[in-house]
Amino acid sequence: MKHLFFVAVATGILSGTTISVKAQTNVNIERIVNKVPAKKSPKFIDAIEIQPEATNNVVMVADENVMLNDTRINIPSVARVGFTLNIEQCSRLQFKYAMMMDAAVESIANYTLYSFIEEWWGTRYQYGGSDKNGIDCSAFTSKVLSDVFGANVPRTAKEQYDVSEKLAIRDLQEGDLVFFNTRGGVSHVGLYLGNNYFVHSSTNAGVTISSLEDGYYQKKFISGGRISSAISKVE
């Protein structure tokens, strides 16, 4: 089934306009344009309903590929059951990473974390590296934990594993670590984001986001790890 994403672009004043997505649909349409009256809530198609508080011209777009801030993006299922979207309150980062992780937009709430990821995105992997010229996996997790979560951790993946509380995948939360055996023992580490996705510095792609459901990482996964209060905090 094609994933559909609905973007509302108001040509008038956007203030107060919300989109309530009550279920997903696979209606084959390219574009629906309608004027939204001030006191009615017309349904354009099943599952999409506009609830205006002001009169606006609204363009509904159903497509797998849409333009967002002049960038063409492929959009998975961001519209979810019971999700209400206030257009003005959603940032570019929320949309970008929600799409990347097939997550609800409102779940991308840690702006500091995703701004950090955006800043480091694509930085090449370099064993022993710790800056924008090249960074390895444990230096990256050490830096993100320090800069975003305010926790100091040891430098290597094995040391980070040793000081963390071990977790099963089902118990992982945003900010936890995920450890892998890629070349013997604890040899790779990333930071868990949610929805089975994690950010890490990979040897092939540099700083990127991957899924724990990927066959390679499923085979290599050792454990999750939570940094406890015993770890010293950054002053």
Image: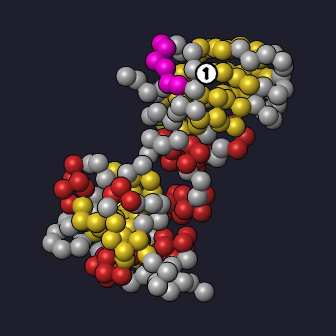
Q: Is residue 213 above or below residue 173?
A: above
The N terminus sits in image quarter: top left
98 relative to 4, above or below? below
- Please tell me which residue is depicted at 54% across the width and 15% down the height of the picture: 30
Q: Position of residue 164 (x, y in %)?
A: 37, 77
Give the residue at x 45% y 57%: 193
Q: Indicate left or right for 137 with 175 as reference.
A: left
* Mark 1 crowd level (few <14, some 14–19, many ≥20, 10 Å Cα): some
Q: Position of residue 95 (x, y in %)?
A: 56, 43
Q: Say which residue appears at 50% left-offset and 48% top-offset.
A: 97
The quarter of the displayed image where residue 125 is located: bottom left
| Local secondary structure at mark 1 | strand
> Residue 130 in magenta?
no
Rendered location of residue 166, percent (x, y): 33, 71
Q: Quadrant of residue 54?
A: top right
Residue 199 visible? no
Number of marks in the rendered image: 1
Q: Residue 33, how many percent across, how many down?
A: 67, 14
**Left or right relative to 227: residue 161:** left
Which residue position is annotated with label 1? 48
Horizontal arrangement in the rendering, residue 49 relative to residue 73 (left or right) = right
Vertical arrangement, residue 144 with respect to residue 49, above or below:
below
Q: Quadrant of residue 49?
A: top right
Which of 131/137 is in front?
137
Indicate the amino acid at tag 1. Answer: Ile
| Quadrant in which the C terminus appears | bottom right
From the viewer's perspective, is residue 129 above or below residue 62?
below
Residue 22 in view, yes or no: yes
Q: Which residues are magenta?
A: 23-28
Of 225 and 203, nearer the camera is 225
Instruction: Residue at 82%, 28% (x, y): give it.
Output: 53
